[in-house]
Image (cartoon, rainbow, N blue to C red):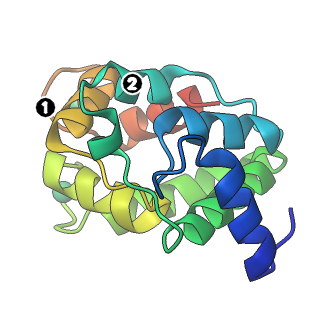
Amino acid sequence: MAKTAENIEALFQKYDVNKDGSISAQGLLNLAKDMGLPWSNKLVNAMIRERQLHADVKMDLDTFPRVVKALEEIKKALYNPQETHEAMVATFNYIDKNGDGFLSTDELKAGMASVVGMELSSEAIAELIRLADYNMDGQIDIAEFVKMVTSFF
Ligand SMILES: [Ca+2]
Ligand SMILES: [Ca+2]
């Protein structure tokens, strides 16, 4: 994956199918697939089910390089499972701002924005939590987080 600003912009144009200056969930899925990530449709489908798709995933040219970098990190991690688990624990702890061992809706929302560069609506976050919250306590613990992240691939 080329990293120069020009190539990033060309890449952005390629996935901004309707040329509205932001990349939709489908564009993100296409990008992940083209990068060789065996990304399942689970997360993206959760977003697509949301009615206001383009309002949920605002990815413009400013945030795009961060997203590409995050995808590259994920790809690297896939080939290194031990580091992957450590990285997931570190990411969980980073997102868990109040350190209570659970990710609340607000923490997950802020985490998706700062770690992955995706500004998701509260509805999309609620859908994510519904998908991942196996013990139905309304929050995501570390085991649920690991399951959630690995289920994306
Ligand atoms: Ca917390
Ligand atoms: Ca839970």
Residue 101 in view (yes/no): no
- The spot of residue 2 in percent (x, y) is 86, 69
- The spot of residue 37 in percent (x, y) is 76, 38
Picture quadrant where residue 54 is located: top left
Question: At x 23% / y 20%, what residue is drawn?
Answer: 135
Horizontal side of residue 130 vs 112, given as left or right = left
Q: Which is closer to the viewer, label 2 or label 1?
A: 2
Mark 1: C-beta under 8 Å from nearest atom of ligand 2: yes
Which image quarter has ligand 1?
bottom left
Q: Residue furthest front?
A: 19
- The spot of residue 88 in percent (x, y) is 53, 53
Does 111 sit above or below residue 142? below
Residue receiving disc 1 = 138
Q: Give the number of the disc on residue 48.
A: 2
The amino acid type found where label 2 is placed reads Ile
Q: Compare residues 139 and 69 and report the one nearer the observer.
A: 69
Horizontal side of residue 85 vs 81, given as left or right = left
